[in-house]
Amino acid sequence: MKKRVNTFHLMAFLFAVVAAVGLVSCGSAKEQSEMLSEAQSEPQAAGSSISGEDSSVPGSSLPEEAVVSLECFDVQDEVLCVRPAGENRAALVCGTPAPDLYDGSFTNARLYVIDVSEDTIVFESEYDADEQLLCVRENGTFVTLDYIDQVIHVYGSDMRPVHSFAMPEGILQADVEEDCLYLISRNEIARIGFDGASESAITFPYDVDVYSFDSGHGRAIASVNPASDTENLGTAIYSEAAGGFVFSTAADVWASYFAGDKVVSVLSDDRYDEEGNLIESLYRLTVCDFPDGSDSVCFLLPNGANCTFFPQTEYFINSVFPCDDENDVPANTRFYILNAAQGEMSTPIAELEGALFIVPEYLESCGRIIVGACFSSDEGVRSRLLLIRPEAVEMTEKLDRFEMTAADPELHTLSQELLPQRESADDIEKEFGVRILLGDECLDAAANGSFSIVSTEDREYADYAANPEEELTEALNTLRRSLEYYPKSFFDSFKNYAGEGGVRFLIVRDMVNENGSFAGGLHYQYGAWYNVVLDVDEIMSVHHELWHAAEQRITNEFAEAFSDIRWSELNPEDFSYCYDFDNYYQDESVFEYIIPWDDDPAKRETVYFDQIYSTMSPYEDRATLVEDLLNESFDPDLYGFADPMERICAYPHLREKLEYMAEQTERTFGYVYWKEVLQNIMKMKEGLSQ
């Protein structure tokens, strides 16, 4: 079942992020390759323009107070956007709501430039309400996006048109320091000059959705969908210097951004009961170092949080929408300053009490947050400006730390009879850095869409065991023994940069699909968890399922690692996988490609698959290879080979597959983990035989 999202908070959150970081999404542009209008040169500042000589009064300085109301601005309009406009200056656009035209429309729009150190309006002009102000360049000229015609306009510092060019499809991010725009598409970030010329800046190896792009340091945070047949699997950090993605973050990230040498992300986790009713929503703030994801911490945000980030600083504004429970309507929104790096929050900002909404922006030139705040009045909506010095705001509350090692919120509790097994599972968790769910605890994990999970505690199930305690004890002992063969660092590789998630084992009675077929094991990723579901009677399938988890981890980082095109080159030309879990064994034509029962050397050149189940899909093809390679019951006398590796590599096509898998495994883990596991298994066998 796909995780549901609290739509109200999500939409508010995304709106706030777009407003803060200045990302503008654009549809397909009209076919206009030529300039729509041209000028020989941009007009110089003159008259009432803003880029002439410094108009500040000698000796002027910024206020040192934590929060200051700017007296120069008080209008009966809504603030639509705010942008930095040079040293100690901000540009803002206001307009009068005109819902009779269409929803979200405005009239009587005006552009203002404010000198925050002098508390004065230094420039004012009429403005087209259908245009989004993208940025104010260092020379004082304005750049806008016409939503209707999908055209970018460049205006002089006096707001006279200079030239225009068609907008390509994608998301725009303005960069004043680099004096350009960046166009973010599914697999590329392109640099666009203000003359319309473009060039590629970063090309991604596959489709991504970019949360944040730091052009000055050539890095980006992107939501990654590495394969066409998978859901969005997570968020990763891209470094141009490293030539790729340097570490992965959690899945289900709402937003993520750079704050100096930190990476800050907000995640949501909605909890539902069995009827689909929302129980609670957890909002988590994670902070870690760039570029390796080290020194990570995770904090809990207040419920109803709506965060507005500023990529240049660790401070951000958190809006909380409390609800009047008696009338079931939102009460007054409260606004706080938060320090992401320290996990600290202020008391509500008194000057914003009663505000309907705010439009904030960070002014890096003076280290202040300017806030356009809209209030209700008898005449409609009035807007005022506040200037916030975040370092001076008193932080009065420490955010609660969020520890992913704690048990998930439980809807199902474990029976008292299984508490000894729970203690054994806890010991294994501590030893190997994994999570283990037993009995009805497994029902709290997100379900796999194809199979239903049957708990070992389900007394109404036909195959219920009279003594589940004994079989769980045996299953845990078997699991512990198998995990001991794995390198100590193996399971740490599955945790995200915040130390969240990792490998989670679910020991269950059965896994049943809609056709009544049973699985001996399953793997599926949910959020930061790599879930490995094991039948209590078939724990030895753990090596097979852990390969599925490892392959998922590899492709999360390198989407092209196991491309169907490359893998098909390792199979017979006339072969295709059946992709039929219920009937994979019925196609007798593939038998000639499978290892014969007698390991006949004469057939080794025609063998491409380890067993019949290998022909079901490329995923099972690879997993069955690892499964047989890590066969803990392998008998050299029975097979005529010293170990499973020697046996499999006796078949050239299987050896080629293993070599390819080893290459991809080493890319992510730094070593070929299953080679080390096999060595440890064989050492154990040698010890027993002595």
Image: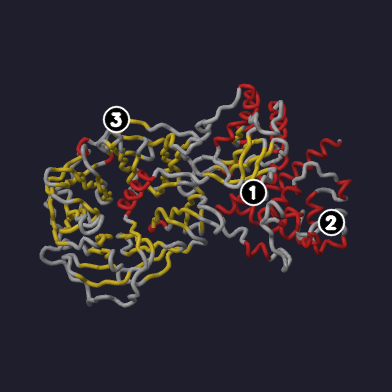
Residue 428, picture quadrant: top right
In-front residue for pair 642/364: 642
Please give the residue where the numbered disc 3 appears in the rendered image: 326
- Name the residue rendered at 22%, 76% in the picture: 39
Q: Amino acid at mark 1?
A: His
Q: Which mark is residue 548?
A: 1
SS state under label 1: helix
SS state under label 2: loop
Horizontal side, residue 173 vs residue 431: left or right: left
Specify few, some or many for label 3: CA neighbours under 10 Å numbering under 14, 14-19, or 20 or more. Answer: few
Color encoding of the figure = secondary structure
> In the rendered structure, are the residues bearing label 1 and label 3 in contact, judged by CB atoms less than 8 Å apart?
no
In-front residue for pair 317/281: 281
Depicted 438 relative to depicted 646: above or below? above
Circle nearer the viewer, 1 or 3:
3
SS state under label 3: loop
The disc, 3 or 2, on the residue closer to the chain's N-terminal end is 3
Query: x, y percentage for residue 247?
Result: 51, 50
Query: x, y percentage for residue 301?
Result: 38, 36
The disc, 1 or 2, on the residue closer to the chain's N-terminal end is 1
- Disc 1 versus disc 3: distance between alpha carbons? 50 Å
- Disc 3 versus disc 2: distance between alpha carbons? 73 Å
- Name the residue rendered at 76%, 59% in the picture: 587
Please give the residue where the numbered disc 2 appears in the rendered image: 596
